[in-house]
Image (spheres, coloured by chain):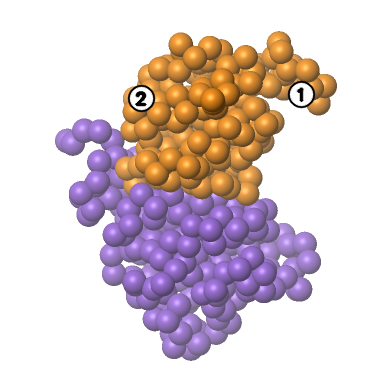
Chain colours: A purple, B orange
Amino acid sequence: MKFLDCVSHIAERRSNQLVVTSAGNSAQAWWAATRDSSGTFYLEASMSLSTMFASGLALAQPQADVWAFMGDGAFCMNPGMLMVERDMNLPNLTHFLLSNRHYGATSNADLPNMAKNDYAAIARGMGLERVYSFDNLAALKAGFDEAVLRNKPGHSFVVLEVEPFDDAEQRLPQPPLDGPELKYRFGRHVEAAFHADIFGYQL
Amino acid sequence: MQSRSHDVALRITDELTTAGIKLVASLPDNWISDLIRCVDADPRLHHVPVNREESAIGLCSGAYMGGMGSVALMGASGFMTVIYALTKINYTYEIPIFLMITLRGAWGDHHKHHVSNGLYLKPILDTLNLPTTIIENPDQIGMISKAYHHGKNYARPVVVALTRDLLK
């Protein structure tokens, strides 16, 4: 499945979800598909922490639906995150693992054991129950509602087998937002959407 | 009759709730084992044991962006592993995070495997310009709230370092 087609389809299915992206290609693809600069937190280069960040957000705002993207490069740095996600089992969190079998943000360098890693099996081995895997767009479209539906009984882990970015895709722009600007844009969005108090004062 | 360390742990737990903290993400250190048990047993707090210290940085940073107060509780060795995450998330985005760590390697720590923390922990805190308060007796536990609220105002990480004399 083409990386951009996959992410574009997920963007089309979005209603009011808060989104957290990981470094590199997922941020590029989500920015290309949405140009969202308020309801998405582009967590650049966190080296595996996008879904932990999203878990904190989902815990703090249980009425929000939170989608978190992560590449398999980041996943391989910290697969134990799934133990924490399983323990928390937040029904308002969906973890999308974009598996391109490469470190996409660093010129598609090879992942260790790239051909054999079975991310769905790893997740099941940690006790996750709502584990889904899609390797083509038709299957993703057909299975999306079941995997990602709102008010599901627990956290979902969705493996998306995608092709690495080609050279032209690698040149897609990154979201052009400085850190503090993104913090305030996203935080003000959460405050307005969910009547939250994040910064301790209103403008 | 409760032990002194358990009493201190209860007082720290109370202080966390007084500060407005709801989430505690922890990894163990023998010095804070009583504290972690007290946090886990307190219904006012949501305790999340995490798989590694960096996960606590991600979790607490995300909780902040949802409006939930939190603390990342860990040993000094764990803290030494989170420098990149702090610089990348909490300094880049200016997201406050409150850390409570053990002051390993300081006077009173008889473990040779914490010599590295004795040598490098404080210099690293200084290098990162990380505001740090050392709490070494129970009368100073009220500093936890002050440090937490300072961090929210400062919009960057702040650290409370707990000594062996306080905890054991």
Q: In which quarter of the image is residue A159?
A: bottom right
Viewer-proximal residue, B2 or A82?
Answer: B2
Q: Residues within 10 Å of mark 2 (few under 14, many from 20)?
A: some
What type is the residue that disc 2 sits on? Answer: His
Residue B23 x %, y %: 43, 42
Q: Is residue A182 visible?
A: no
For residue B79, which numbered disc appears in the image?
A: none
SS type, badge 2: helix
What type is the residue that disc 1 sits on? Answer: His
C-alpha distance separating marks 1 and 2: 30 Å
Going from N to C along the chain, the mark reached first, 1 or 2, is: 1
Give the residue pinned by disc 2.
B149
User: Compared with residue B84, is residue A99 higher up or lower down, i.e. above or below?
Assistant: below
Viewer-proximal residue, A81 or A14?
Answer: A81
> What chain does mark 1 sit on?
B
User: Compared with residue A49, is residue A107 higher up or lower down, i.e. above or below?
Assistant: below
Residue A163 x %, y %: 61, 74
Q: In which quarter of the image is residue A66?
A: bottom left
Query: CB of mark 1 within 8 Å of CB of mark 2?
Result: no
Residue appearing at x 53%, y 58% in the figure:
A87
Residue appearing at x 40%, y 17% in the figure:
B142
Give the residue pinned by disc 1.
B114
Please, which residue is most extreme toward the left here?
A: A203
> What chain does mark 2 sit on?
B
Viewer-proximal residue, B11 or A124?
Answer: B11
Quarter occupied by the N terminus of chain A: bottom right
Residue appearing at x 78%, y 66% in the figure:
A113
